[in-house]
Image: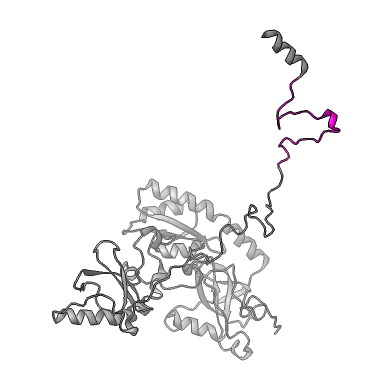
Amino acid sequence: MDYKLDTGGCQMNKKGCHRNSTQKLSTFDWMCDLPETQQDTDFVEVQFKNTRKGYFLNSTKIPLEKGDIVAVESSPGHDIGDITLVGRLVLLQMKKNNVHPDKIEVRRVYRKAKETDLEKYQEAKSKEQGTMIKARQIAESLNLNMKIGDVEFQGDGNKAIFYYIADERVDFRQLIKVFAETFRVRIEMKQIGARQEAGRIGGIGPCGRELCCSGWMTNFNSVSTSAARYQDISLNPQKLAGQCAKLKCCMNYELDSYMDAIKNFPSKEIQLETLDNTYYHFKTDVFKGIISYSTSQNFGANVVAITSRRAKEIIAMNKKGLKPDLLDDHADDEVTPIAIDYENGVGQDSLTRFDTTKKRSGGKSNKRPNNNRPQLTKPESPENKTNVPRFQKPVKKNDTDAKNIAK
């Protein structure tokens, strides 16, 4: 096995551990450098267009490696795909995806793709864009409340899978008949959600990285606005929604940590009473253990930040009918309010650090001289020097005589 060190991080050999950047939901093969694991099973993982994967049996013992293009059994005909995993890791992936060989029909790997197979495959793929546009027009003419998101042709061109999105149940029996007459192929309709469509299309999220649904996510859990409330995220629909127009999946990533930490905080509905004012909950910093209270219930006014321990003490005093003088107690060092410093989230560098108009340390400006500005020339001799104001055109003798005559 040829090993190659790659400074990019994941790659260990030519067809082993690396993640293929051209394929979505590619798996990191962490067993690639263990040769004894490559022959543990005859099953291989094959990936087709976008995120569609399948597990096939290499019954003829063809020497296959990750990255090989193979022709596999399909119904009807055959399909063309890329091998993404071989060896022991395939069994782990099948267990993760609840694929049991004894309960499903096992399909086989026919051969490595030949040149004729690849020609048919490219010919079928070239029809997908035009077919999708035509399918959308047909669905609209039949007044069906659905959206054709993508079309995938089988490797031999005998079958086409139409991926659609619909909020309600759609009766597309008539649609399938029209599709079969128009495209002359076997039709399969497959419903997907908005998050799955975003994963198939791909893109870059507001964080600057590849979409999670396109990079590694396979299961999509429901996301509710309560996840934003627990984390004190602004309930702005434009910021909370992802490219699929649904709530961002990443709002669930840290939700459990926030819910565990917030158990030690008093309820947001409890008001704190002092001798002077009544304070309402304004904001909670979960991981710093700080709660901000305001004298106004609707906006931040006279905001005071105290620890959760101090808030519990005041709540206990209020239950006994006692009211402290101040919300924060400076006599106790442990509950002294912590000053909250707000910093620029972009960075600490000045936005004008690249401006060329700044003066240097010597006091000279970096401005270039304006060549269009009129320049004064020094007189050749004192005799030719005249008392003419600066930048004023000298008066000619003829003009002076004409003025005297006019007077």
Q: Is residue 364 left or right of residue 200?
A: right
* 139 magenta-colored: no
Percent of width and height locating residue 12 = 65, 81
Q: Is residue 30 left or right of residue 316?
A: right
Looking at the picture, tell me which residue is in the foreground, 277 or 136: 277
Q: Quadrant of the N terminus?
A: bottom right
Quarter of the image that includes the C terminus: top right
Q: Which residues are magenta?
A: 370-395
Q: Residue drawn at (26%, 75%), measured in percent from left and top?
A: 327
Picture quadrant where residue 241 is located? bottom left
Camera-nearest residue between 147 and 14: 14
Whether residue 319 appears in this view of the structure is: yes
Percent coordinates x, y for residue 98 in the rendering = 42, 80
Q: Main secondary structure of the magenta part?
A: loop
- Direction from residue 282 to residue 365 in the image, left or right: right
How many numbered circles does the render carry?
A: 0
The one of 176 and 44 positioned closer to us in this rendering: 44
Write the residue at 58% across / 55% down: 126
Provide residue 166's location: percent of width, then percent of height.
36, 58
Q: Residue at x 69, y 52 (%)?
A: 366
Front-most of 389 and 88? Answer: 389
Q: Quadrant of residue 96?
A: bottom left
State which quadrant residue 352 falls in.
bottom right
Outermost residue, left direction?
321
